[in-house]
Amino acid sequence: MPIVPAFNPDTGASGGPASVAAGFAWRQILDFDSLTFSDPNSLITSYSAAAGLHSLTLVTLGASNVDYNYGSGANFTGGRWTFPLTYPDGSPVQAKDTFTFSTKATNLAVGAARQWNIAFAAVQNPTSTVLNTMDALGTTAGVSGVGTPLCGTWRRNVVGTTSLAGGVTVYGQSLFGGNPGKAKVGASVTIQAAASSSPAQGLDANTLSVSDNTQMYGIIAVGTLGTVTTTGGVMAFKLFYNVEKLS
């Protein structure tokens, strides 16, 4: 029987029948145009998408700024796209739910080193610039050197990363404990190359502070890779995700 989605971040549609496949299935974000965008410091100078390949042009920073790095300090004022999280049947993901948020990043452009990092996470407050209030849990992907992409886990204001020369695909999963307690359990991630892989994981152990029925949001955040001077230019990637309710 057709199911009417509350929101489809892939297309921006807010209605119309959609068939829901049984079992796990990746949901690709084909473009960001229908998502909510914020970039108060103009760090992203251009964006385009073609067949699901996202291309961002990022500025070069001559001095470090802790507020552009979501993995340290207290605030994050870098660029972001956000959207309401829904399950495959269109129902909202709520803070009281026990659920997993799975992510995949592919087609990473690795021809030049960048000190920028793309995070894909679930958050309780998509508009806050205070990391404790945002309270993210998810994964990251970036490029630490020519031909060497990286992946990481993002837990509130902590990021742990691992790099792998020749890496191709980043897979991650985050677990939200739901009621009782609304604990954010942790995240795990791996980057895979043709003949090897490199994993990372991080315990979160913080708890969501919003009310039980608050809808969770997805966030695609663009931050610096540490509090360092930052080389800009083009970053390209494809993004996929899935949300599964466990209770």
Image (tube, helix red, strand yellow):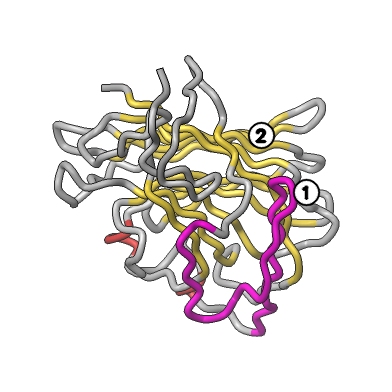
Find residue 213 and report its horizontal and vertical position in percent: 17, 43
| Crowd rating for badge 2 (residues with CA inside 10 Å; few <14, some 14–19, many 20+) | some
Find residue 206 and report its horizontal and vertical position in percent: 27, 46
Q: Which mark is residue 198?
A: 2
Q: Are marks 1 and 2 in contact (CB under 8 Å)?
A: no
**Residue 121 forms part of the magenta stretch:** no
Q: Which residue is mark 1?
A: 148
Q: Nearer the viewer, residue 100 or 116?
A: 100
The answer to whether 17 is drawn above or below residue 113 in the figure is above
Image point 16% across, 37% down: which residue? 181
In magenta, the rendered stretch is: 34-62
Find residue 88 and report its horizontal and vertical position in percent: 42, 29
**Residue 46 forms part of the magenta stretch:** yes
Q: As drawn, which residue projects farthest toward the front?
A: 16
Q: Nearer the viewer, residue 57 or 116?
A: 57
- The amino acid on which the numbered mark 1 sits, given as a three-letter code, is Thr
In the rendered structure, the answer to whether residue 236 lies left or right of residue 5 reads right
